[in-house]
Amino acid sequence: MNFQNAILVVAHPDDEILWFSSILSHCKGVLVCFGASFTSQQRWDSGRSALMEEYPLTKVRFLKLRESDAFATADWGNPKQVDSGLELPRGRSSVYEKNATRLLRVLEGELTHESLVVTHNPWGEYGHEEHVQVFRTLARLKQKIGFDLYVNSYVSNKSIQLMSKCAHSLDGNPSMRQTDKALAHRLRALYLENDCWTWIVDYDWPTYESFYRVIEPVDETVPGTRASVPLNYIPGNFNQSPLRKLASKALPTTVKSLIKHVSPGE
């Protein structure tokens, strides 16, 4: 598969190198959807703003939509897919749903004339509500515009339940690509320098990534799956601890951000 004509669409700054290092230097353009946090008071906000001004790849464009406060609020034990992404608890879905409407409008304008798009998989890699939202937005646009849509194969123990509901929508013949560890290390250093790296500091990229073409509406329930191994399984426990569940319901956002970043974030 040749990705030189592809537009890569990711949710957050650093997603482009975490989950797509093998194609980042090959695709013709990159759109990063979100910028500032929900409150604009997270520890990475100022760093992200500075990084956007000095990002070394000119084909990367930052759309700078404001994040919702959706991370770690869905029921990943029994995830329910909705048009905006995943069903969230009452009181937490308003901004998330508004962002879905904004994304649909903005990305339709950006992608109207494109034929190939790559993005997050339907289960959001390790399980991120906004990754799922970006995928579902693009799945809707795929039906409207008609571009080919490809997704990566990263999965964790948290997201595997949703993967089992979605994998039928993917072509079973993946395109394998070797990760670009030199570029990954270079961009990680830049994110760390600006204090806005949201993943494991010493993360070791796999040797290969695989990409699947989306061939069916993801909402249709089909027994079994066409998708074959290999999957890029992300080691570690990404399920919410009791402390993080409590935080997501009761604590102020500024306190939750400290708990959130004890383990991988966006």
Image (cartoon, grey):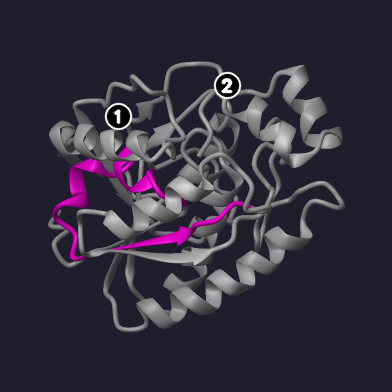
Q: Position of residue 35 (x, y in %)?
A: 50, 57
Density class for disc 1 (Cα within 10 Å; few <14, some 14-19, many ≥20) is some
**In contact (CB < 8 Å): disc 1 and disc 2:** no
Cα gap from disc 1 to disc 2, whole angstroms: 29 Å
194 is higher (above) or lower (below) than 8: above
Q: Amino acid at mark 1?
A: Pro
Identify which residue, 75 or 100, lies in the foreground.
100
61 is higher (above) or lower (below) than 39: below
- For discs 1 and 2, the disc positioned in front in the rendered view: 2
81 left or right of 120? right
Q: Which mark is residue 28?
A: none
The residue shown at (50%, 38%) is 224
Q: Position of residue 18 (x, y in %)?
A: 34, 38
Q: Amino acid at mark 2?
A: Val
183 left or right of 118? left
The quadrant holding residue 215 is: bottom left
Q: Position of residue 198 (x, y in %)?
A: 46, 35
Name the secondary structure under disc 1: loop
Q: Position of residue 152 (x, y in %)?
A: 34, 44
Instruction: Confirm whether the magenta stretch covers residue 110.
Output: no
Residue 175 visible? The answer is no
* Residues in magenta, as a range: 12-37
The residue shown at (13%, 33%) is 182
Indicate which disc, 1 or 2, sits on the residue closer to the N terminus: 1
The residue shown at (47%, 54%) is 11
Name the residue carrying label 2.
Answer: 262
Instruction: Confirm whether the magenta stretch covers residue 35.
Output: yes
Q: Which mark is residue 230?
A: 1
61 is higher (above) or lower (below) than 16: below
Identify which residue, 61 or 164, lies in the foreground.
61
